[in-house]
Each structure stands twice: as C-alpha cells, then as structure tokens.
Image (spheres, rainbow, N blue to C red):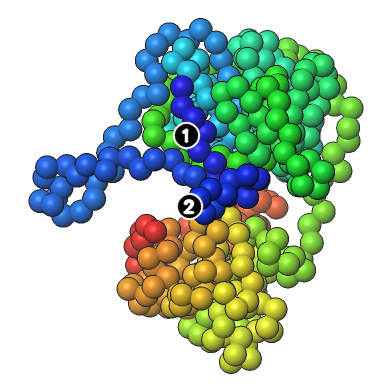
Amino acid sequence: MHSIKRIDPRRPFSVTAEGLKRITLAELGTAAAPNLGALGGHREQVKPRRTMAAAQRSLLVAAHSDRGSLDDHARQTLAAAALIADATTQVALLVFGEFKDDAAALGADKLIEMPSFDRRAFTPDVALDALAACVASYSPAHVFIPDNSTGDGDLGRRYAAQAKASVATQVVEISANHVSIYTQARKAFAVRSLPEVILLAANAVDARLPFVGAGERVDATQFKSEGNAVRQRHEDLGIEEIDAAQVALEEADFIVSAGNGVTDVPAFERLASTVGAAIGASRVAVDDGKFPRDKQIGATGKTVDASIYIAFGISGAVQHLQGIKDCRHVIAVNLDASAPIAKRANLTIVGDAAETIAALTDAAAKARNARANPSTLPPVASAPGSGKLEGALA
C-alpha cells in the first residue's frame, strides 16, 4: 500500500519548523546505472508492476476522455486509486470515449473503453447506466471520479443519488483510510472515512507513479444495455459554437500564437478562424502593433493552459515560456531549430511561418468541407517544401 503524496501545498497545518514544503513522490532510480555515462545521458528506469497478486477486491475509476486521452485531473484521480490500493486490490478504469493512452503506465490494471461516448454530447442517463453496470460487475469498494464541470462531476453525483451511496465531493486529500475537504469557505478542514463514491478535486494528487499497472483491456460490450433499454430523459440541444476570438485566452482550449516571424497578420487570422482557435501573440508582436495588448501571452501578459498551443515565429523568451508552462501540447513553427521554444515544444516544425500557415489553412478548409460533404474526399495536403518536421520533446 502506498501513501498519497499531495501536490497542493495549501493544506492547513502544513507549516513545519522547516517552512511550508511541497510534498511530491520520492524520486526513482537515484542510483546511476554503471554504464550510464557510456550511454551518453540519463535513461529512465523501467517501473515495476504495482502488484502481481491475485485480485480480491476492486477500485473503480470513471472518467471521460478528451481526444483519446485523459486530462490531468482524470490522471490524478486514477493515480489516487492506484496509490491507496493494496497488493490484493485491482484498479479498474472505465473510460467514456476513445482511449489511446497507456493504461498500465497510468496505473490501471483493467481498462474498460467505451468509444461510443462523446464528451461533447450530453447523455447522462446512458453514462449512468454504463457506470452502474460496471459497478455491478466489479463490486468496487470505492468509485473514484474527477470532480470537474465537464460531465464527470455531474455523473458522480447522479450515481451516488441513484445508488444511495455515501459520497464526498471536492476531495483535496486522500489516504487509505480517510478523505478531507475544505469547509467554511476554506477556513476549516473536514475529515471522514473513505465513502463509497469519491469525487476528487483537481491537483489533490501527483499523477506520477513509481509503478505501473497490468493494463489489461476488458471487453466493454458486456456493460452495454441490451436493445438500448436506457431511455434518455434529457434532450441534447447540441453545442452552440461561438467565434473563438470571443473566448478569453485564459479559458481557451486551442490557441494559435504569433511572434515576430509572422508578417502576414490577415493570413494568420484566417488560419485561426478556419481551425477555430483563439489568437495570442508574443510581447514583440504586441509591441510592434500587430496585435492588441490583451492578446499578449507571457509573464507580463496572459498565462494560458490550453490543450493545444501553436506558436508561429516565436523564439521563446523566458517570459513567454512562463505564460505557456501549463499548456498540454505545444507545437512550435520556427526557422531556427535551436530556438528556446523548441526545448519546450512537443513538436517543432522547422520551416517558414507563412508557408506553414498557408498549408494548415488549406488543409483545415478541406477537412471542414469533407466533414460537410462526406462523399468527397480531399487530397492529402503536402507539407511546405522548405520545411521539415522534427520531434522536439520537452
């Protein structure tokens, strides 16, 4: 059994004689390999399986995926279950939506993927029925769900009400025998034993684990209702799309950002409109008058946490990198492969910003047309001739 290491340093009564300290998981592999120097760098050690014993009980984690992946909040929730599981407890992960991540690396022993679910569609009754079917099959001691505003928190509350189960919401601390939440406008700290349903707050647990799970995939058809017996009591009116330019940068999930390397601003704005992304800019581009001050991203501008951030012609000054430190996927387009932003980017496109903008705009427009008219398949867009792709891992 592993103790939980929290990454939220604001818990009451955490000040010690040494001061306020952030608690993180212990570092792994501190002893260097004998031939590490000969290999020319650090090599990540293989993590052990959490347990090899036969499962006698289960913990169930449920969450919606986003473009085939679990977000940080869902990963933290899965890590919480894995960390409090003992040697005879298996961790089952139920994913509503397509799942492309490595379930074992995230700590799951069983994976139940339901790709028919779409996070953009509001189907609470169907999701509730699927969750109840999984609970009936695994009889978990506890159900873990991220307490977010994008569907999971609502699902957890619906299930607890339907099953008449004990529940704790916005849990900020968890161990093998208790959970804790803030009360009285964060002036007090309430503690209770583990309930049947645990809705975990964001950043309550460090998602990095010192072990891996079994990652065994389970056939999800056994958890589907026969003949679509579940009747949806809610009407999904769909998502009302708005102009991405109206979305505040702090709330945007997809951002394209321009730097000094972007000379054709109208073409850049057309790309943003075509792909449905919010517009950001570096300080240099703002100082040059290309963009208003409220579009500036960086230490002296806006701090963003978009899922996708594409930087065109931005070298990556320290101040700008501070503004995008929480972005999930960063793509850099720059003629200089050694620019500082390439060290932060998950993918670097070495090429001219104007050519890349034109190619992406054309590809996005063809993809939209193909979606509107499935009978016509657009030709594969070619990459700019002067550029090449280089994967630059952060």
Which disc number belongs to residue 106? 1
Q: Left or right of 378: which side holds 162? A: right
Write down the quadrant of residue 25 in the picture.
top left
| Residue bearing mark 2 | 18
Q: Residue furthest bottom?
A: 288
Compared to residue 78, the image places residue 70 above or below, namely: below
Percent position of residue 255, x then y? 61, 65
User: Which residue shows up at 46% across the image and 75% down it?
Assistant: 318
Percent position of residue 76, x then y? 56, 38
Tell me the element at label 1: loop
Figure quadrant of the C terminus: bottom left
Distance Cα–Cα, label 2 vs label 1: 33 Å
User: Which residue shows up at 64% across the image and 19% down it?
Assistant: 142
Compared to residue 344, the image places residue 357 above or below, namely: below
Residue 115 can be seen, yes or no: no
Residue nearest the observer in this picture, 185 or 33: 185
Type of residue at label 2?
A: Glu
User: Which residue shows up at 66% across the image and 29% down it?
Assistant: 179
